Amino acid sequence: MLVEAALSARQKIRWYVKWMHEATFTILDCAINIIQKAKQTLTLSMQSGGWLGSKDWRNSL
C-alpha cells in the first residue's frame, strides 16, 4: 500500500514537472514571437517613415 502510494505520487510529480516544462516552453515561444512581430513592425514603420519613423515624433505626442 505504501509502495503503491509512493509510486502514484512519483507519477503525479513526473506528470506535473513535464506539464510545467511544456507550459514554460510554450510561454517562451509566444513571448519570442511577440517580440519578433514587434521588432518587424517597428522596422517597417521606421523604413516607411511612419509615425514611429518620423524624426519629429516627440512633437506629435
Image (cartoon, rainbow, N blue to C red):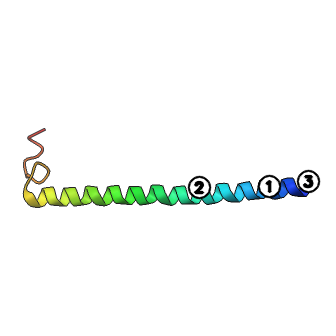
Crowd around label 3: few <14 · some 14–19 · many ≥20 (10 Å): few
Does 45 sit left or right of 13 as displayed? left
Q: Quadrant of residue 16?
A: bottom right
Decide which of tag 2 and tag 3 comes sooner along the chain. 3
| C-alpha gap between disc 2 and disc 1 | 18 Å
**Image point 50% across, 60% down: which residue?**
25
What residue did someone put label 3 on?
2
SS class of the residue under badge 2?
A: helix
Evaluate if marks 1 and 3 touch, with contact meaning CB atoms under 8 Å apart. no
What residue did someone put label 1 on?
8
Type of amino acid under label 2: Met
Type of amino acid under label 1: Ser
Decide which of tag 1 and tag 3 comes sooner along the chain. 3
SS class of the residue under badge 3?
A: helix
Evaluate if marks 2 and 1 touch, with contact meaning CB atoms under 8 Å apart. no
Residue 20 disc label: 2
**Image point 8% across, 41% down: which residue?**
59
Residue 36 in the image, given as x and y percentages of width and height: 30, 61
Does 17 sit left or right of 52 as displayed? right
